[in-house]
Image (tube, helix red, strand yellow):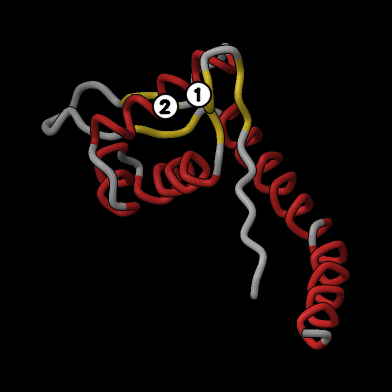
């Protein structure tokens, strides 16, 4: 048995930040493109675009800067705010998951004892 946790942030409109959005932001940072980031994490461009819109709406800050001009007119980069937010969210979710380890170990131990009593 193992513990699986899902940590996300929500506002009155619903979820706006979770591990999927974090992966999307990390991929945008790495690849410099929303379309390429969406493909890398296995979601459609329209889903990725909606995730970014929801995040920006909830936070009240832009998180990507779209590159305009040039031959291909493609690309996106994270705003400085987005990079900082991504880092603090990543630390937060890792800390939350770490804090769940000891209670889960206690639960598992008690469960194993219960199973042996059968």
Q: Secondary structure at mark 1?
A: helix
> Residue 68 or 60: which is nearer the viewer?
60
Q: Quadrant of the N terminus?
A: bottom right
Q: Quadrant of residue 4?
A: bottom right
At 71% from the left edge and 40% from the top edge, which residue is drawn? 88
Q: Secondary structure at mark 2?
A: helix
- Residue 3 is left or right of residue 105, and the answer is left
Which quadrant of the rendered structure holds the C terminus?
bottom right
Q: Measured from the top left, where is residue 81 in percent x and y?
A: 61, 26
Q: Please tell me which residue lies in front, 97 or 74.
A: 97
In the image as oriented, which residue stretches furthest toward the front? 118
- Residue annotated with mark 2: 52
> For mark 1, does the 10 Å Cα neighbourhood hold few (<14), some (14 to 19), or many (20 or more) residues?
many
- Please determine whether, in this image, residue 20 is positioned above or below residue 108: above
- Image height of 116 relative to 32, above or below: below
Disc tally is 2
Occupied quadrant, residue 92: top right
Query: x, y (%) of residue 46?
Result: 24, 30
Q: Nearer the viewer, residue 38 or 64?
A: 38
Q: Is residue 33 left or right of residue 11?
A: left
Residue that appears at 79% across and 81% down: 112
- Counting from the top left corner in percent of width and height, residue 105 is at 83, 72
The reply to whether callout 2 and callout 1 are in contact (CB within 8 Å) is yes
Task: Give the residue displayed 85% in from the left and 77% down from the top.
Answer: 109
Vertical position of residue 59 compared to residue 109: above or below: above
3D distance between C-alphas at marks 2 and 1: 5 Å
Q: Which residue is pictured at 53% across the width and 27% down the height?
A: 15
Kindly identify which numbered label has been placed on residue 86: none
Binning the other alpha carbons within 10 Å of mark 2 as few (below 14), some (14 to 19) or many (20 upward) gives many
In the orientation shown, which residue stands out farthest toward the left? 71
Counting from the top left corner in percent of width and height, residue 101 is at 80, 65
Q: Which residue is mark 1?
A: 55
């Amino acid at each position: 048995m193992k513990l699986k946790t899902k940590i996300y942030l929500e506002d009155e409109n619903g979820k706006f930040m979770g591990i999927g959005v974090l992966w999307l932001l990390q991929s945008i940072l790495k690849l410099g493109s929303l379309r390429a980031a969406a493909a890398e994490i296995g979601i459609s461009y329209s889903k990725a675009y909606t995730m970014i819109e929801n995040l920006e709406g909830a936070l009240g800050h832009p998180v990507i800067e779209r590159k305009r001009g040039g031959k291909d007119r493609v690309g996106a980069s994270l705003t400085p705010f987005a990079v900082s937010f991504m880092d603090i969210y990543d630390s937060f979710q890792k800390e939350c998951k770490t804090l769940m380890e000891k209670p889960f170990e206690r639960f598992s131990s008690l469960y194993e004892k219960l199973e042996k009593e059968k």
